[in-house]
Image (cartoon, rainbow, N blue to C red):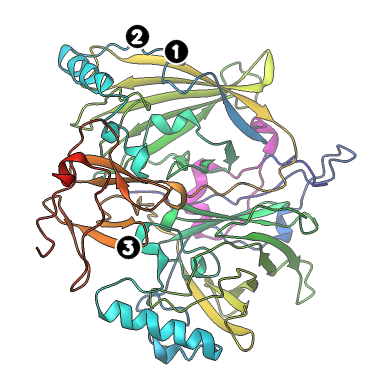
Amino acid sequence: MLFQRSANTVALAAALCAACTVAFADDSKYPEWRGQWRRPPGIGIQWDPTKALGPPQQAPLTPEYQKVFEASMADQRAGGQGGDPTYTCIPPGMPRAMTVVFPMDIIILPEATYIIIEYSNQVRRIYTDGRDWPKDAEPAFLGYSVGKWVDEDGDGKYDVLEVETRGMKGPRSFDASGLPLHVDNDTVVKERIYLDKSNRDVLIDEVTTLDKALTRPWTVTKKYVREKKNVIWFEYNCTENNRHVQIGKDNYYVSADGFLMPVRKGQGPPDLKYFKDAQQ
Amino acid sequence: MFSRRMVTIIALAATLGMALSLAGVAHAFDEAKYPDLSGQWHRIGPDRFDGGTNRDAPLTPEYRAIYEKVRKNEAGNMIADPMLSCQAPGMPRVMMAYAPMEIIVTADTAHILIENIHDSRRIHTDGRPWPGEVDPSFRGLSIGQWQDTDGDGRFDTLIAETRHFQGPRYFDGSGLPLHQDNNTVIRERIFLDKSNPDVLVNEITVTDSALTRPWTVTKTYRRDRTPVAMHRESVCADHSSHVAIGEEMYVVGPDGNLAPTRPGQPAPDLRYFPR
């Protein structure tokens, strides 16, 4: 029988290295988020968990991006992958990472909160040391997250982690339908993460996305349930047994017997001009 | 300018973990008992498992023959290195630390975070026994224990044992193989160099059916205490140009066309495309 994650991930020392002072954080000030967090039973991997995947999401897309979305769905109906870039094991990035396809755990340190998500091996680092936005951060699928702990109810304990994430790269989509984000990658994601006051084993993430593919900021609320007992972390490797391959701009499939095959009707083979035997 | 990482992480009463945390009891902790492993750790030495040429790898004759066959094809057939097609290297290869390594110690887990393919590990230090059934994985299941080897009242060494693997796995990018039965057992002793606390030592002993005896190598890592402005994201699938089709590895050239990775490599069989 496995132990549940029993550690209070606590804290020490801190930022202030300019003076090289070690400051000790008061662990009683931080909420207790240890454990394994999963999507609630019955909740799928669509972006807004209260609505079905696809058009029912009623995403506030601009007319231009509504067409992009419709083209994605049409391509998927024809056997393609549409606008979902994750089929080649590109990670979902932000904000889609917070769909938490596979479980996550959260480590709270005074200077940063780590969100470790098994799906696509994503480790979010939310810096809470008071830093400013970097001037030349390298774009990343997960972006760059700066957060702030807030004591909303004034009980002397932090209860809400407010996060802003910028500096994303693409391609990214909100979910597997290919619900698009803008290609300029100037997405800004704002989150409020806190425990449900009526059930401390439910974590809530209010995610607001600002993106030029949208006509207005779009807020959805994600919930996660905590598993404390017998926590097992399984390994998920997207690339293992992934049969999709990308050659140039085309997506192909590798059959179970190891041969390249088309993914849609009428799709031609790749150009094999660099192979001598193919020229004969 | 960002603050440098000064955090040491702390702990609760690990052995009491389950019962007490179920009861929701707040614990005292003694952070001073754990070594300061903060910062980013960079591998010292070349990216071969023994830090040299692997010449002394105690392979069985069968696996020596497999290794030699791979080495002869090293320049061409790169199917022997699964990392090229973004497959997870697994243990013990992840401890090559292909990207800067970060270690976060909590009372029940030592997290080893490495931004490579799927290299991050959890070493459980909560006193759990080996479970009866475990899904095999590339990184395996690691159970560890902190030890105070010099009796000064502080933990100084993390002992870890890792089992329950899947494959294929190799010791490193040279194609040095582990046995396909995946019954590897890896024991590690991880500690700071007493003469230089900015050097981390990992004594890794691999017991594997491809070896004639347990093979111990010592890997070392240099600490970088420089404040980390940004932990760099590494996404293999975002930059890999290799494509595995059946038993062959190909490369996609800058023009988007498939190309061979060795002279005379046959083109992929297109039997499933309409003529």
Where residue A92 appears, x then y in whole percent? 47, 64
Q: Look at mark 3 in the image and give the residue it sits on.
A: A250
Where residue A48 appears, x then y in whole percent? 48, 82
Q: Which mark is residue A230?
A: none
Quick one: which residue is furthest to the right in this view? A19
Pointers 1 and 3 in contact (C-beta within 8 Å): no
Q: CA distance from mark 2 to mark 3?
A: 43 Å
Name the chain under label 1. Answer: B
Residue B87 visible somewhere in the drawing: no
Where residue A124 appears, x then y in whole percent? 58, 56
Pointers 2 and 1 in contact (C-beta within 8 Å): yes
Q: CA distance from mark 1 to mark 3?
A: 41 Å
Q: Is residue B10 magenta?
A: yes
Amino acid type shown at disc 1: Gly
Q: Is residue B26 magenta?
A: yes
Quick one: which residue is furthest to the front in this view? A280
Q: Quadrant of the C terminus of chain A?
A: top left
Q: Nearer the viewer, residue B235 or B146?
A: B235
- Image depth: mark 2 or mark 3 in front: 3
Name the chain under label 3. Answer: A
Amino acid type shown at disc 3: Asp
Magenta region: which residues?
Answer: B9-36
Residue B34 visible somewhere in the drawing: yes
Amino acid type shown at disc 2: Arg
Secondary structure beneath dot 2 equals loop
Q: Residues within 10 Å of mark 3 (few under 14, many from 20)?
A: some
Does residue A75 appear to the left or right of A49 in the view shown? left
Secondary structure beneath dot 3 equals strand
Q: Look at mark 1 in the image and give the residue it sits on.
A: B52
Q: Look at mark 2 in the image and give the residue it sits on.
A: B55
Please give the name of the residue rendered at 21% of the width and 14% of the height, measured from the top-left corner.
B64
Q: Residues within 10 Å of mark 2 (few under 14, many from 20)?
A: few
